Image (cartoon, rainbow, N blue to C red):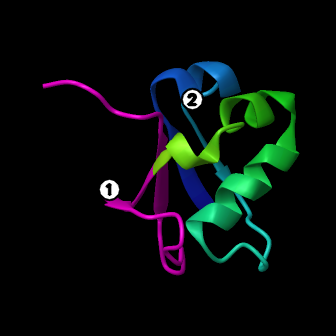
Amino acid sequence: MTRLVYFAWVRERIGKGEEEIDLPSSVVTVADVLNHLKTLGEEYETALQYPDVIRVALDMEHVEHDEPISGAREIGIFPPMTGG
């Protein structure tokens, strides 16, 4: 099981702050996770319709979409961040 944590408007659009799911063995990178999540329902597809702007953290460390997820205990999914 992998713990997914959703933040800000991603959380609002999906309708939950976190969940634990079994990811298929074909899901090996962050991009694969985002693509898989979009298949779980309309709310996921809406939240992740622009994957290029989605930020992801593996075990609280921001990573790029080509990063392997092997060994990650928690995957955080964020909208773009702004601020000063």
Residue at 75% in and 56% down = 35
Query: Crowding at label 2, few (<14), some or many (≥20) Cα neighbours within 10 Å?
Result: many
Residue at 66% in and 21% down = 13
Determine if residue 9 is in view.
yes
Measured along the vertical axis of the image, is residue 77 above or below residue 11? Answer: below
Measured along the vertical axis of the image, is residue 30 above or below residue 83? Answer: below
Prevalent SS, magenta region:
loop
| Disc number placed over residue 60 in the picture, else none | 1
What amino acid is labelled 2 in the image? Val
Measured along the vertical axis of the image, is residue 78 above or below residue 57? Answer: above
Counting labels gives 2
Residue at 72% in and 36% down = 49
Q: Residue furthest left?
A: 84
Q: CA distance from mark 2 to mark 1?
A: 17 Å
Measured along the vertical axis of the image, is residue 1 above or below residue 4? Answer: below
What element does badge 1 sit on?
loop
Residue 61: image x %, image y %? 30, 60
Residue 42: image x %, image y %? 86, 30
What element does badge 2 sit on?
helix
Query: Crowding at label 1, few (<14), some or many (≥20) Cα neighbours within 10 Å?
Result: few
Residue at 47% in and 58% down = 74
Q: Which residue is mark 2?
A: 10
**In the visual, does 4 lie left or right of 61?**
right
Mark closer to the chain start, 2 or 1: 2
Residue 53: image x %, image y %? 51, 41
- If the image is split into quadrants, where does the C terminus sit? top left
Q: Is residue 76 magenta?
A: yes
Q: Which residues are magenta?
A: 56-84
Residue 82: image x %, image y %? 28, 27
